[in-house]
Image (spheres, helix red, strand yellow):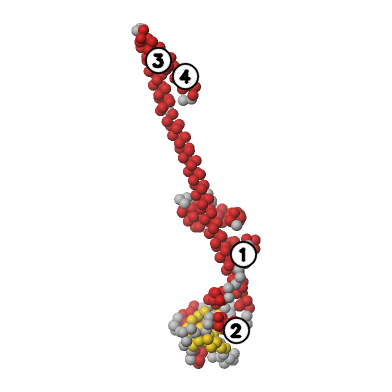
Amino acid sequence: MNTDIKLGCIMSIIFFGSMSIWGILKEKEGNYVLIATTVFLILYFILNFFIEEKPERMNEEIAVKNVAKLKENERLKNLAIEELKKLRLERLKKEWEKYYQKRSFSFVYKLSGIEFESFMIKLFRELNYSKIQSTDAVGDQGIDILFIDLEGNKVGVQAKRHHGNIGNSAVQQLLGGMLFYSCDKGIVVTSSGYTQSAIDLSEKDSRISLWSGDKIEKLYHEIFPSEVPPLSIEIAKRFGLLLRARLSPTDFDEAFQKHGLDYRDYYSNSDIHSRKFMLDLEDQSY
């Protein structure tokens, strides 16, 4: 009911009510018409003002609640996005560090066999092993380096600076060399990795250890920490590190579910995988 109709009803009730009271006081005949009219106007006013007005107020309350819910969802969405940005930044920093560590270690892959042995001797010295020595290059009986470890064991080492995986023949040669030099333990160390047959054979004898390129790289960085420059987004783009640190739909799902939201209400999987979206997120993050 609009304001003009409300005002008209009130004025009519006052008028007919007054006339009804006047008729009752004057004992006028036919006053029941005025009384009935007054009662009708009062009922009409009540029905329209109180009953019809209630749904309008309810609709307004619902609208206000909906707006509040939208604002809260937007706030939660922004929280989820901020968490995703932090996650991506953490991943990018790890990729950045791995790249520069690998880069600083890359010289090992260019060493000759003799140079690789010298490199390993330097590493063993830093590990506080003692009595480190090289065997003769010719007739070494499968052992390139000997040393005493921290437990007092005599250890024989076969060093293989190699690009491909090392086979079980290296393990066999090491076993012969251990026998020849009376070693308590033996290590095959390489800049690459090992075939499954080499791994299987080494597991048959607990005295034998296989050191892969990953292991010696880790040791190298622990002993000789490489200086990693501050993160540069421009350089990271050039090296393709941003792609390695990209976010997945699963990341979005976990971040949004944490706040009671469904990321699909805001983004499609194609949005998440798109390079443009990835760069937009990056520009806001850093």
What's the CA distance linking mark 4 and mark 2? 106 Å
Image vertical order of residue 184 relative to residue 81, above or below: below
Q: How crowded is mark 3: few (under 14 residues within 10 Å), some or many (20 or more)?
A: many
**Amino acid type assigned to the residue bearing label 4 in the image:** Gly
**Amino acid type assigned to the residue bearing label 2 in the image:** Ser
Tell which tag, 4 or 1, sits nearer the viewer: 1
Q: Earlier in the sequence, mark 2 or mark 1?
A: 2
Along the line of sight, which residue is nearer the eye, 200 or 161? 161
- Dot 1 falls on a residue whose secondary structure is loop
| Circles 4 and 1: CB atoms closer than 8 Å | no
- Tell me the residue at 54%/91% (across/down): 141
Q: How crowded is mark 4: few (under 14 residues within 10 Å), some or many (20 or more)?
A: few
- Tell me the residue at 57%/68% (across/down): 98
Q: Which of marks 4 and 2 is nearer the N terminus?
A: 4
Q: Mark 2 points at which residue?
A: 118
Q: Name the residue under label 3.
A: 17
Is residue 88 among what the camera can see? yes
What's the CA distance linking mark 4 and mark 1? 77 Å
List x then y, in percent, for residue 92: 57, 62
List x then y, in percent, for residue 50: 41, 27
Is residue 33 among what the camera can see? no
- Tell me the residue at 51%/52% (across/down): 79
Q: Is residue 19 left or right of residue 92?
A: left
Along the line of sight, which residue is nearer the eye, 138 or 230? 230
| Circles 4 and 2: CB atoms closer than 8 Å | no
**Amino acid type assigned to the residue bearing label 1 in the image:** Pro
Q: Name the residue under label 4.
A: 8
Q: Mark 1 points at which residue?
A: 230
What's the CA distance linking mark 1 and mark 3? 87 Å
- Dot 4 falls on a residue whose secondary structure is helix
**Amino acid type assigned to the residue bearing label 3 in the image:** Gly
